[in-house]
Image: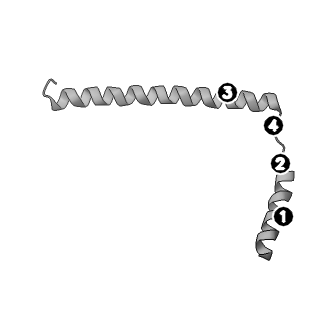
Amino acid sequence: MKNIGQYLKSVQTELSKVTWPAYNEFIGSTTIVLILIVLFTIYLGALDFSFQWFAEKIFSGQI
């Protein structure tokens, strides 16, 4: 039990040393991350669709 209390106290100490981003910086970074996630999802979906289409053509004997 003593180790858990010591651990939590050290976590609190380390968190107090963190420089948290300002609200505008946080919103900007979050927006960029969400846009990149959407773009990457679209890219992977298109890639998956292309591979599926190509595989269907190969296995059906059309290519």
Q: Residue furthest front?
A: 1
Callout count:
4
3D distance between C-alphas at marks 2 and 4: 9 Å
Q: Residue at x 73, y 27 (%)?
A: 28
3D distance between C-alphas at marks 2 and 3: 22 Å
Sequence-earlier tag: 1 or 3: 1
Which residue was labeled with disc 4?
A: 21
CB within 8 Å, label 4 to label 3: no
Q: Residue furthest left?
A: 61
Q: Residue at x 15, y 29 (%)?
A: 60
Q: Which mark is residue 18?
A: 2
Q: Quadrant of residue 63?
A: top left
Q: Which of pointers 1 and 2 indicates the residue nearer the eye?
A: 1
Q: Residue at x 82, y 53 (%)?
A: 15
Q: Which of pointers 4 and 1 indicates the residue nearer the eye?
A: 1
Q: Amino acid at mark 3?
A: Thr
Which residue was labeled with disc 3?
A: 31
Q: Residue at x 17, y 32 (%)?
A: 59
Sequence-earlier tag: 4 or 3: 4
Q: Is residue 42 left or right of residue 6?
A: left
Q: Amino acid at mark 1?
A: Lys
Query: Badge 4 local density, few (<14 within 10 Å), some, or many (20+)?
Result: few
CB within 8 Å, label 2 to label 4: no
